[in-house]
């Protein structure tokens, strides 16, 4: 039997959680499918082993989100609860209530899922949510983002550690998947992206960012942990089969109405041409390495162009000549960070940001544009990014303070 189809040995499974021994507790996202069921089983065995060896272990809470989209979901949640009780793990079932959208259902369900998981983590006083994303999921994610024209950040794929975005909204193609899009924090505790990437390569959960104090915003952050990113799904299925543990099969995972399902169906054909899950995941790791280097350069550029702390009230001012001399990708991200800081109309879309940046590079001075609630003004001497005035005020100025109608 090929190793890709072998059950995980106990030592391998325990190593997946290395570095988590000192955390207070972990929220395990468990739907009842093979991946998350294997996560629950392996985490329970790991915690039990820790208690024997250290007399303590992180508290585990398995959380099942009942999206209410299928009649079987309640029964499946009950099955997870029964297994968790057998393993000595606390369990919660949380329901996604309210109106369900007719389009974009999977995205809306994902947003609701992360929001509910974050609420449970906050209630329990935990800082870490563990998901069962596998090597196969990583490959599908890269294909999905590639098909949607994602930038370098998106093609880096999922990281083994990532902060849960504010309001528990997962990364989207506009900012998280499209470009660097970070906001300058001017925090001494911020770990440069290049060091984050190096640490992840050495030990996925070694030196978690929550350890240490003094930064309230960092202390309040919740992190997503993905310990199974290098594990093929087939090995998890084999692990459950060897242990005699049953799991559920969600038929929506085979529904061709969803783009991710259609991409999943292509993987065997792509694999036959050498573009298998391992190859795609390797591409993601290389992209993440490049992403870390670029973000390091963007940090340095931000500090050099505007060394004072950036305030959301703005304005942020860059010397025009020095901004123009930045490499294009670095300049694009510096501009995006500034707009994200002072704007008030949500994420900055990569395509629109690229169009604005190209205009700044091609146009003579005295250019003025708005994007995502920010006003961008270019003169011969400086590039200024500040909060755009309210749209009604802009309309009144254009019409001489007369009422504006379409």
Image (cartoon, rainbow, N blue to C red):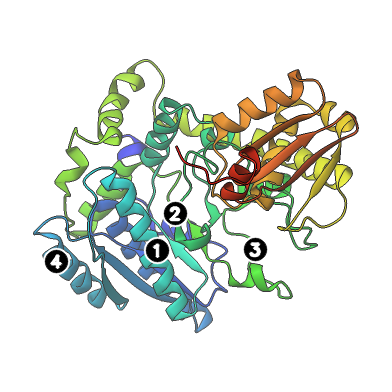
Secondary structure at badge 1 equals: helix
Mark 3 crowdedness (10 Å alpha carbons): few <14, some 14-19, many ≥20: some
Can you tell which quarter of the image residue 9 is in?
bottom left
Secondary structure at badge 3 equals: loop
* Left/right of residue 223 with respect to residue 361 in the rendered view: left
Q: Are marks 3 and 4 in contact (CB under 8 Å)?
A: no
* Left/right of residue 165 with respect to residue 189 in the rendered view: left
Residue carrying label 4: 74
Residue carrying label 3: 209
* Left/right of residue 393 with respect to residue 320 in the rendered view: left
Q: Spatial distance from mark 2 to mark 4, Cα to Cα? A: 33 Å
Residue carrying label 2: 12
Location of the N terminus by quadrant is top left
Visible residue check, residue 230: yes
Q: Earlier in the sequence, mark 4 or mark 1?
A: 4
In depth, the one of 112 and 253 nearer the eye is 112
Q: Spatial distance from mark 3 to mark 2, Cα to Cα? A: 24 Å
State which mark lies toward you, 4 or 1. Answer: 1
Give residue 145's position: percent from left, percent from top. Answer: 44, 32
Mark 2 crowdedness (10 Å alpha carbons): few <14, some 14-19, many ≥20: few
Can you tell which quarter of the image residue 181 is in?
top right
Secondary structure at badge 2 equals: helix
Give the total number of marks visible in the rendering: 4
Q: Residue at the spot x=62%, y=60% of the render?
A: 206
Give residue 361's position: percent from left, percent from top. Answer: 75, 22
Q: Earlier in the sequence, mark 1 or mark 3?
A: 1
In depth, the one of 176 and 28 nearer the eye is 176
Location of the C terminus by quadrant is top left
Residue carrying label 1: 115
Q: Residue at the spot x=74%, y=33% of the render?
A: 330
Q: Residue at the spot x=79%, y=41% of the render?
A: 384
């Amino acid at each position: 039997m090929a190793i890709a189809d072998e059950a995980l040995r106990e030592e391998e499974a325990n190593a997946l959680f290395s570095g988590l021994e000192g955390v207070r507790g972990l929220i395990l996202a468990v739907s009842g499918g093979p991946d998350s069921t294997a996560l629950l089983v392996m985490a329970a065995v790991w915690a039990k082993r820790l208690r024997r060896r250290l007399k303590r272990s992180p508290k585990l809470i398995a959380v099942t989100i009942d999206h209410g989209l299928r009649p079987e979901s309640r029964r499946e949640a009950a099955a997870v609860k029964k297994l968790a009780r057998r393993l000595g793990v606390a369990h919660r079932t949380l329901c996604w209530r309210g109106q369900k959208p007719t389009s974009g259902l999977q995205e809306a369900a994902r947003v609701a899922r992360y929001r509910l998981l974050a609420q449970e983590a906050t209630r329990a006083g935990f800082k870490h949510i563990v998901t069962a994303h596998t090597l196969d999921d990583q490959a599908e994610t890269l294909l999905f983002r590639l098909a949607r024209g994602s930038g370098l950040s998106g093609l880096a794929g999922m990281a083994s550690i990532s902060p849960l975005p504010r309001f528990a909204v997962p990364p989207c193609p506009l900012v998280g998947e499209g470009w660097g899009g970070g906001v300058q924090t001017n925090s001494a505790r911020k770990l440069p992206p290049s060091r984050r990437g190096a640490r992840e390569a050495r030990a996925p959960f070694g030196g978690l960012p929550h350890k240490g104090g003094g930064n309230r915003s960092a202390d309040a952050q919740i992190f997503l942990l993905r310990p199974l990113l290098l594990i093929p799904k087939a090995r998890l299925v084999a692990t459950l089969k060897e242990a005699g543990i049953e799991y559920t099969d969600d038929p929506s995972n085979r529904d061709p109405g969803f783009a991710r399902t259609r991409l999943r169906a292509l993987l065997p054909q792509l694999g036959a041409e050498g573009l298998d899950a391992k190859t795609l995941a390797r591409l993601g790791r290389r992209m993440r390495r490049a992403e870390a280097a670029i973000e390091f350069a963007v940090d340095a550029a931000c500090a050099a162009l505007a060394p004072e702390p950036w305030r959301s009230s703005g304005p942020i001012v860059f010397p025009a000549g020095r901004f123009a001399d930045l490499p294009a990708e670095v300049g694009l991200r510096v501009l995006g960070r500034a707009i994200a800081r002072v704007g008030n109309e949500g994420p900055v879309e990569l395509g629109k940001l690229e169009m604005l940046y190209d205009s700044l590079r091609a146009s003579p001075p005295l250019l003025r544009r708005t994007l995502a609630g920010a006003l961008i003004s270019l003169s011969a001497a400086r590039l200024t990014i500040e909060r755009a005035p309210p749209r009604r005020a802009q309309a009144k100025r254009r019409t001489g303070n007369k009422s504006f109608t379409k």
